[in-house]
Amino acid sequence: MKTTEYYRLAQSENSHWWYRSVHELIMSQCQQILKGPAFPKRPGVIRLLDAGCGTGGLTEKLTALGTVVGMDISSLALSLNKADNVFLVQGSVNATPMKSHVFDMIASISVLYHKQVKEQRALQEMLRMLKKDGIAVIVLPAFDWIFGMHDRNVYTRKRYSLGETVNLMKISGFKVLQARYLFSFLFPIFFLKRISERILARNLSDLVLLPPPINTLFEWICRLEWKLGKIIRFPFGSSLMLVVQK
Ligand SMILES: C[S@@+](CC[C@H](N)C(=O)[O-])C[C@H]1O[C@@H](n2cnc3c(N)ncnc32)[C@H](O)[C@@H]1O
């Protein structure tokens, strides 16, 4: 990612509606999974990896679930990482410096689509690091046809469709427990932003902080979507989430 984007991420991840709502969703998913029937009950503390942890907004929250390792390829990201009580490691998801069969859960939010990531290799690494029946929660940007300036700034290799990612997970050897689009309700606004970027040829980061009332409104809209998402699957969105099992 461009250096400016790391600073922007560090500055906005605890207040920006996108991060606040996606972190809330990931945390509730992880809590549900850990209590649910798919997850084998094991003695001892739960071990989690935040693969591509960036500046640590989610890493910090994951400590509520167990012992957390945050890993990122960027020394700048790690130096800006504010998470307390986590082990921070510099390394690439393509060839991690971790042992095999050590994690119960891996979260990888907005990472596998990066130019520096070889997705097949990264998924094989996740399989290797996960314990038997371990879970990975993965978030990716959706739809290559809405590739924008922000994607260029964060070195996006590509954006994905849900069907494509489900196939990718299956081919890699994962069982897919859940696959859904995210940010469906706000998708029209996202789409209009992309169109205006193209018309105005302006570099508008997706991480710009909006005025607080709009930021809060967007967060509430996402919360409503997460609630309805338990019973309805929406056919589009600006991101997608997969919950997969080894
Ligand atoms: C968009 S940020 C997301 C950060 C964090 N997961 C979050 O949701 O806030 C993408 C992160 O992936 C990291 N990254 C990119 N390629 C990587 C690789 N090959 N191995 C590990 N981290 C990588 C970047 O340095 C950056 O911190």
Image (cartoon, grey):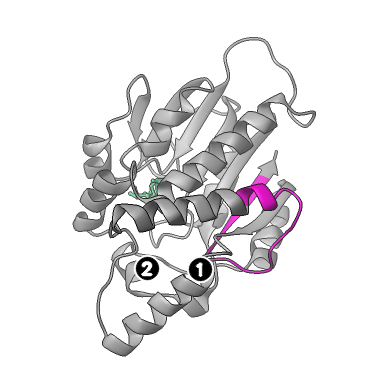
Q: Tag 1: residue type? A: Arg
Q: Is mark 1 within 8 Å of ligand 1?
A: no
Type of the residue with mark 2: Asp
Is 232 within the magenta? yes
How far from the left and from the top, in percent, is residue 193?
Answer: 39, 76
Q: Position of residue 150 (x, y in %)?
A: 33, 68
Rendered residue at 34%/31% (across/down): 89
Q: Which residue is mark 1?
A: 159
Q: Quadrant of the N terminus?
A: bottom left
Marks 1,2: beta carbons within 8 A: yes
Q: Position of residue 182 (x, y in %)?
A: 58, 58
Residue range highlighted in magenta: 226-243
Q: Is residue 44 above or below residue 197?
A: above
Instruction: Please give the name of the residue rendered at 24% of the width and 46% of the height, measured from the top-left corner.
Output: 11
> Which numbered marker is on residue 151?
2
Where disc 2 sits, the SS reads helix
In the image, is 67 to the left or to the right of 206? right
* Quarter of the figure with residue 196: bottom left
- The residue at the far right in this view is 37
Give me the disc on residue 212: none
User: Viewed as shown, does residue 194 lie left or right of 1?
Assistant: right
